[in-house]
Amino acid sequence: MTVEEFNTDKGLYSFKFDNVETEFHSHPAIELIVATNRTFTLWTENDTYQNVTFAIIDANQKHKLSASDSALKVIMIEHHKALTKAILACNSIALADGFYIQTKQGNEEDMIREIVQRINDSEFLTDYEERILLTIRYLDQHDLEYNLMVDTLQRVTNLSRSRLSHLFRANLGISLKKYLVWTKLKCTIKQHLNEPEDLFSSLIRSGFYDHPHFSRNFKAMLGVKPSKAYNSTIVQVSPILVP
């Protein structure tokens, strides 16, 4: 696995895999998957798609994939749902039931380059209600435990507990608790990629209790065990990420 970009400020993450096989998982990011040679298989909760060359998976949609003989490029886009879907619509692509599946080569590389460029040129987090934007930024900047999070965010946003939870789910499609875990995962990965410390030190510093706690959540959101993703014999970091 090669990490090409891990930009938490823009919500843009890019990876290359020589081969990959995941279990069912979901995450609050739109995922674009391109087979750079051969094809891959994608499972949703209701269907199986074989000989796939390109797929788009909407945020918070359960899926798994297998590409044992194929190289894949994976782009994950967080927070820029309206912009991304507008560009998809201009390319006559709609996410029916949360997925788009293609079994022949097309103009997806040009479209992906346009999406990435537009995101890099755009303001961050423009999709959300103002108080939810404040919530996201606060979570990204502060290390909170769940039992303190809701009370803290109520004070920050001046919203009741029920209103805050409702607005957050309406804007992002997931609960505050799940988004907090996602934030801690991103923090761990970013620290491990860019700072000279081992994975265990990074996950503890990001607020996970221990390695099993981190591993369960990593697998639930990314589909593989962290030991597989971060095996030192396969993980590489693109030179642009090295400080």
Image (cartoon, rainbow, N blue to C red):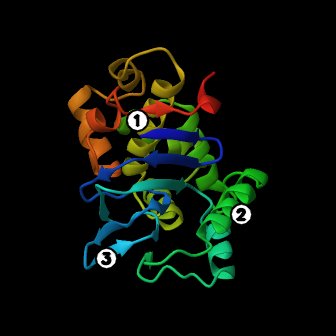
Q: Residue furthest left?
A: 212
* Residue occupied by mark 2: 114
Q: Residue furthest right?
A: 121
- Rendered position, 121 above or below 137: below
Q: CA distance from mark 3 to mark 2?
A: 26 Å
Which secondary structure, mark 2?
helix
Q: Residue furthest top?
A: 196
Q: Earlier in the sequence, mark 3 or mark 2?
A: 3
Q: Is residue 114 left or right of residue 108?
A: right
Residue 40: assigned label: none
Residue 148: assigned label: 1
- Rendered position, 95 above or below 176: below
Q: Is residue 69 visible?
A: yes
Viewer-proximal residue, 121 or 53? 53
How many residues crowd around disc 2 within 10 Å: few (fewer than 14), some, or many (20 or more)? some
Amino acid type for the residue under numbered disc 3: Tyr
Residue 49: assigned label: 3
Which secondary structure, mark 3?
strand
Amino acid type for the residue under numbered disc 2: Glu
Judge depth for marks 1 and 2 and give the one in front. 2
User: Do tag 3 and tag 1 residues touch (Cβ < 8 Å)?
Assistant: no
Q: Earlier in the sequence, mark 3 or mark 1?
A: 3
Amino acid type for the residue under numbered disc 1: Leu
Tell me the residue at 25%/73% (across/down). Answer: 45
